[in-house]
Image: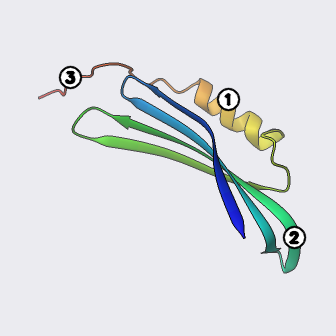
């Protein structure tokens, strides 16, 4: 059994950001049954009206909280990402 919840959803200009948390019960992990496991996903959808770019990050974990070195690296990467926001006219 599993359930997914939207942790955060935000749209600014031409960028949509979503963060999801999936809780999985009785999952088989490395040949063992884990009573509960988590999968955190972050996705960004960037569109210029004609095209769309998608950034999708998936992190499995035994802890539902976004902490630890992998989340630090993800946040550092996102903080260095520059995306134009607002109306973007296509170049022709």
Q: Position of residue 19 (x, y in %)?
A: 61, 41
Q: CA distance from mark 3 to mark 2?
A: 49 Å
Residue, x 34% and y 19% (percent of image)?
86
How many badges with numbers are in the image?
A: 3
Q: Which mark is residue 34?
A: 2
Q: Earlier in the sequence, mark 3 or mark 2?
A: 2
Q: Please state which of the two labelled residues, at mark 1 or mark 2, is closer to the viewer.
A: 2
Discs 3, 2 touching: Cβ within 8 Å: no
**Label placed on residue 76:** 1
Query: Is 28 positioned to the left or the right of 58 in the image?
Result: right
| Coordinates of residue 36 in the picture (x, y in percent) | 84, 63
Give the x, y percent position of residue 33.
87, 76
Circle 3 sits in a helix, a strand or a loop, which is it? loop
Q: Quadrant of the C terminus?
A: top left
Determine the image quadrant of residue 12: top left
- Does 80 appear above or below 55? above
Q: Is residue 36 above or below residue 58?
A: below
Q: Which residue is mark 3?
A: 89
Name the secondary structure under disc 2.
strand
Instruction: Give me the residue at 26% from left, 41% from top.
Output: 51
Q: Residue furthest top?
A: 86
Instruction: State the image coordinates of residue 29 (x, y, percent, origin top left).
Output: 81, 72
Q: Which mark is residue 8?
A: none
Q: Residues within 10 Å of mark 3 (few under 14, many from 20)?
A: few
In space, the residues marked 1 and 2 are separated at their CA atoms by 30 Å
């Amino acid at each position: 059994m599993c359930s997914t919840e939207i942790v955060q959803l935000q749209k600014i200009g031409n960028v949509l950001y979503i963060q999801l948390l999936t809780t999985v019960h009785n999952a088989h992990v490395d040949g063992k049954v884990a009573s509960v496991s988590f999968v955190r996903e972050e996705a960004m959808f960037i569109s210029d009206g004609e095209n769309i770019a998608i950034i999708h990050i998936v992190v499995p974990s035994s802890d539902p909280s976004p902490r630890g070195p992998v989340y630090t690296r993800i946040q550092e990467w996102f903080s260095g990402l520059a995306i134009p926001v607002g109306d973007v006219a296509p170049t022709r």
